[in-house]
Amino acid sequence: MSQPIRSALVSVYYKDRLEPLVALLKEQGVKLYSTGGTQQFLEEQGAEVTAVESLTGFPAVFGGRVKTLHPKVFGGILHRRHEAGDLAEAAQYDIPPIDLVIVDLYPFEETVASDAAEEDIIEKIDIGGISLLRAAAKNYRDVLVVSSRDQYEAVTELLRAKNGATDLEDRRHYAAAAFEATSHYDTHIFNYLSQGTALHGAALKVSQKPATALRYGENPHQAGTFYGDFPALFDQLHGKQLSYNNLVDVDAAVLLMQEFAAGEPACAILKHTNACGVAQAPTVAEAYRHALACDPVSAFGGVIIVNQPVDEATAAELNKLFFEVLIAPEFEAGALPILQSKKNRILLRQKPVAFPRKQVKTLLNGLIEQDFDRQTETAADFKVVTQSAPTAEETEALVFAAKVCKHTKSNTIVLARAGRLLASGVGQTSRVDALRQAIEKAKAFGFDLHGAVMASDAFFPFPDCVEIAGAAGIRAVVQPGGSIKDADSIAACDQLGMAMVMTGVRHFKH
């Protein structure tokens, strides 16, 4: 059912991108109603505007908190044009129809993110705007609603193509978009206000946008979508669209590199969310070479991340390897042409953005939520439990190994020296198997484990891991402790002349 637009209410917070739509409404003779700053903006565009106050006969009050909340406004939107009773009441109370509502919402989410004072945040809870959107969307049979500046261009093209009229399908589409906007808005208000109250945790409300369709999900027969503002975190400088698996690995890479955000240059190479190489060195190029040497076989087709700008020398080294994604805080001018020589290679420039404090995952017929694991142990957190303490160099290596271990799939064992991963055993059902896997990998790539250190993501229920590690040359161990048989592992270390420290903190990663 085609419905001509003869009148419109325009009240927006953001005025940018609105000019072409205003020009078209003027051209098509649409009667405009507006408020405050929007009215001034429309008049500056040469439009004739009727103030909402003139329509309602009531001024804006309470510092602008109440402007549009009036029967003449909401009646104009909500009355049903096909109902004789509604039309009679509209005529009786002199309520003119409003066929188009253009409203965006106060920037509540952005204000919270800016760490504004609570009184400023509360004032960004939109009342009139969200009510107008809901009213117009409810009456989509007769009214077109525009709820975002991102829609202005498409709506302008629609009204131009259909000579100022819309079909029921058009209006239903934009009504659904309006309710998406209001539900997203209300979700963020609830999550803000419920903090520290009895309601916090009583319901899980998540709303992420925009939605980006992926080529496919984890496998080609699965559809996949990413919900979130990817450009807020990265500038993609080159390469194909990221896949589901790319995104999972990028997430793992970024979280691991946060452990090395400060200090000397660092590089990590990941495959299937596990690090197959991590190193720190005086230069990015050297850090990359050491990380690659850890497991050059697994590095093929992986994701690489560095914590310093990529220079030309590093780019030349990187270009010798086939990899899917490279993440860096910056790329020097001479480095980009080298790295862009491969058409599909994805280059991401990472921006400094805060991450969410919670993790959410689908499980069974619902969701589970937990705090992000933001805790990282330093040497000050180490409790020496053996007769001998680790040397300064061993302590540095233990801190490094513990950081990598935290971001590796359980059960895991990490073998390292100061600033350099030697090998890891990942995702094993037995900790002994994880250790044996790590030792075999280290030997396969020519690493001498004598004097190296070991990190475990959980306690040792038996002394077998310590005994196997000692036989391979490992001299120091870091683990959380907490087993009823901790004493057995400690005694094994003492017998082998090894040092062991406990952190008291477990970092499982399932």
Image: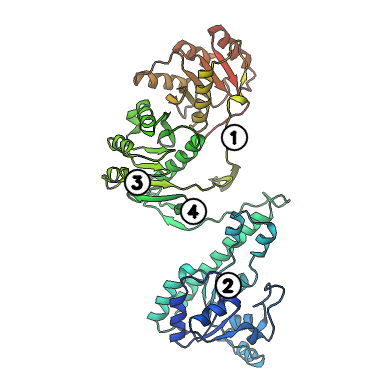
Mark nearer the N terminus (3 vs 1): 3
Mark nearer the N terminus (3 vs 2): 2
Q: Is residue 166 left or right of residue 202?
A: left
Is 313 placed above or below 210 here? above
Task: Name the residue that disc number 2 marks.
Answer: 133
Circle 2: element type: helix
Give the x, y percent position of residue 88.
63, 91
Which residue: 26% across, 45% down?
341
Question: Quick one: label 4, few (<14), some, or many (20+) residues within 10 Å?
Answer: some
**Marks 3,2: beta carbons within 8 A:** no
Is 436 placed above or below 126 here? above
Mark 3 or mark 4, whichever is nearer to me = 3
Task: Name the residue that disc number 1 marks.
Answer: 375
Give the x, y percent position of residue 175.
52, 71
* Kind of residue indicated by mark 2: Leu
Q: Is residue 246 left or right of residue 59?
A: left
* Kind of residue indicated by mark 3: Ile
Task: Name the residue that disc number 4 marks.
Answer: 228
Circle 4: element type: loop
Which residue: 60% across, 10% down?
491
Q: Nearer the viewer, residue 184 or 450?
A: 450
Question: Quick one: label 2, few (<14), some, or many (20+) residues within 10 Å?
Answer: many
Tell me the number on the disc at residue 346: 3
How far apart, in angstroms, are the residues tagged by discs 4 and 1?
Answer: 25 Å
Mark nearer the N terminus (4 vs 2): 2
Q: Residue furthest right?
A: 198
Mark 4 or mark 1, whichever is nearer to me = 1
Circle 1: element type: loop
How far apart, in angstroms, are the residues tagged by discs 3 and 1?
Answer: 30 Å
Mark 3 or mark 2, whichever is nearer to me = 3
* Kind of residue indicated by mark 4: Gly
